[in-house]
Image (cartoon, grey):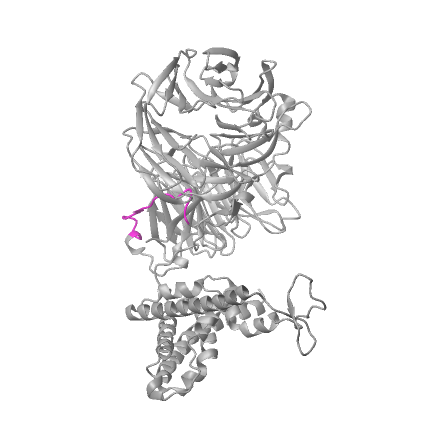
Amino acid sequence: MGIFEPFRAIGYITAGGVPFSVQRLGTETFVTVSVGKAFHVYNCAKLNLVLAGPQLPKKIRAIACYKDYTFAAYGSDIAVFKRTDQVATWSRHEEKVNMLYLFGEYVLSADAKGNIFMWAFRGAEPNSEPVGSISLGDKFTPTCIMHPDTYLNKVIVGSEEGPLQLWNISTKKKLYDFNGWNSPVRCCVSSPALDVVAVGCSDGSVHVHNVRYDEELMSFNHQIRGAVTALSFRTDGQPLLASGGSLGVISIWNLEKRRLHSVIREAHDGSIVSLHFFANEPILMSSAADNSIKIWIFDSNDGDARLLRFRSGHSAPPRCIRFYGNGKCILSAGQDRAFRLFSVIQDQQSRELSQRHVAKRAKRLRVKEEEIKLKPVVTFDCAEIRARDWCNVVTCHMDTPQAYVWRLQNFVIGEHVLTPSSSTVTPIKLWDFKTCKLKSRLDVGKSVTKIAFHRPNGLLATVAGDMVLILFDTVSMKMVRRFEGHTDRITDLCFSEDGKWLISSSMDGTLRIWDISLARQIDAMHVDVSITSISMSPNMDVLATTHVDQNGVYLWVNQSLFSASTNTENYGSGKHVRNVCLPAVSSAERSEEEQVQNSGESYKSSIKPFVVMDHQIPNLVTLSLLPKSQWQSLTNLDIIKVRNKPIEPPKKPEKAPFFLPSVPSLSGDILFEPPASTKETDISTTKNTYHKMSELSSHFSQLLQSCGETKDYSAFTDYLKGLSPSSLDMELRMLQIIDDEESEDLEQRPELQSISSLLDYFIHELSFRNNFEFVQAVLKLFLKIHGETIRRHSMLQSKVKKLLEVQSLVWQKIDKIFQGARCMVTFLSNSQF
């Protein structure tokens, strides 16, 4: 294990050009999209991420959904997930699976050789074998599958060669051949009208066809906008058809007037992958190969669409990143001419910084938005001091002599443009910030390509074309370090916040960490995709990287902060470099928790700790990660019970309702006599409650005893964590010894044996410093209940003495660390620099 280990990737919304899958559950609508080797589920109401699937061995090629189940095709296999748990794998295809289609109780899968398999799925555990198969032939390459409404057990399959075929899935027979239009079929959808479908072709034509009579009703053509890659009919009563092209344009066609209704120009920066009109709503959702999902609403008087909401990332690889906001955000500039702010905590807070009305200016000048945007950023820097008062980010752009400033407070470009004077590339100049005068100059002697300056210690790192890192002390104006090891062009470098490390990346695919004080390399790792930019968080817990041909930002965890066993000696010489895989696009360690209620069920992101420790850190304790209220309530149960007591007793009714039977009493008060059945029910309920309490107590003692025999108390601790504070209090009180008996007979009591086993449990947990705050709360409650019993019996006193020794030893070590940190903070806060 090295210093940096993969964590996860951010900035991916859609990837791979895979059509999304939309389904409605209860009152909510969800869309499932592919993000490379994983899938994400978004709530369409706000486009919030509600579910993140696990990583698959290969990229997803097709996706389909049915209630809680997701079907993802990768390579020649199909993975079946129930939420995030993979429950089955279908592996009958010999070629790559290109399409999945949910058809009633079946899932149809089609591969590149024209083989279609039918998989039965009825909500139970899916079968591992298909129920049938169809071979379309060698001269028929399927491109799309569609089921015409009301056509029982029938699907239409489009082909790369142009023709279409109608098949009966039940009988596995071909019913009809459609000649097509001498152009490859790209998409096919059913219309609200019976027997009518729409077919999109590669030549840019859209054909509205009657499949019952094999007659064309109408056709549209937008050849100048590329091939038709997606279609969708509007279903709220308006006769409109949306078609998406390979150039990122969405066209809206009026079926009654048989003409173009409107055009959403530059809807996406890449080819449209999917279109979907929501049922009975004037809302259209689209996705494209530009790493974005957009929702459009048709609510204007002229019937044109406007953008309602969207989620997007970089449509081209980013080339420069920097941490911002105390490590909570990452500024990123990409080749798509976009300047973005990514949130490391919550993905939905990511956004693109505005370049001031680009869309309006492009529409007014009748040019593309790309021509209005600034050219790609080459490098930038930021400062968080007084960010509300002025622009705090400056960017340099490709083939542009000016530098631009940005106001992150408002997420917009600033009002000033900086025009520096021209200078050579081999002297490095140092300026006095207060006087704005040239302070000194360093002559490197070679063309400088990268620099990094660490202000606290005054070190300046430079990179020239010879792949050598040189460090200068800007105070003494001397070279202090020289690092060699990279075998290709160095792409980026950065200092750690404490100034002890210098991190560099290269086109040779390596990332190297240099210890400045030791003047040597302490770690090196190699990834398959070359690194283009790096940035380390101010807390030094996360390293961010960008890579060639990758649209996301990848995060790596600094294991040296959490573990003392990083094995870096083998890689320190530079001769050995460890190979590391890129972080997963969707990992189990999600940093945000979002859930959506659907028909009594909810989607939940799998939440795990930021770093999973495989061993105990010396001299420290491990917390239980339980909510504060759960373990704090154990220490305050008496106060809670007092607060929950009623203020006054319940009042007696003045008069009995006429329908209730009453009996006279000596005091004159009205007494209500419950029916005999009610009395019997109360007695039965009391008995059941007693039996349940006895069963719980028995399970508590048996689990404690079995864990004590193996000295593995993890199962017992999990059981205690799952109990509510009142239930745990009841479990401990069930072990109380109330009656006085002879000591000899008392030692045989099972309650005393359980108390002794509990003391062994506390000694074990405190010795290993596990679940420290939870164990302390349980121990306090235990001593409050059983303290008198322990004091009266000698067989328990020896264990209590050992427990006291372990508790004192552990707390002394923790208290020593606390006091050391307290003294250091007090010293620094009282010092004046």
Please name whichever residue, 2 or 203, is drawn nearer the observer in this view of the structure.
Answer: 203
Q: Is residue 577 left or right of residue 595?
A: left
- On screen, 537 above or below 752? above
In magenta stretch: residue 476: no
Front residue of 476/628: it is 628
Q: Position of residue 102 (x, y in %)?
A: 41, 31
Q: Is residue 572 magenta?
A: yes
Instruction: Tell me the residue at 31%/53% (across/down).
Output: 572
Extent of the magenta region: 571-588
Q: Quadrant of residue 688?
A: bottom left
Q: Quadrant of residue 646?
A: bottom right
Number of marks present in the image shown: 0
Q: Could you say where residue 554 lies in the image, as x and y percent from the top left?
A: 43, 44
- Judging depth in this view, the residue of 456 and 268 nearest the camera is 268
Is 330 located above or below residue 245 in the figure?
below
The spot of residue 89 in percent (x, y) is 32, 39
Q: Main secondary structure of the magenta part?
A: loop
Q: Position of residue 618 (x, y in %)?
A: 37, 67
Q: Quadrant of the N terminus?
A: bottom left
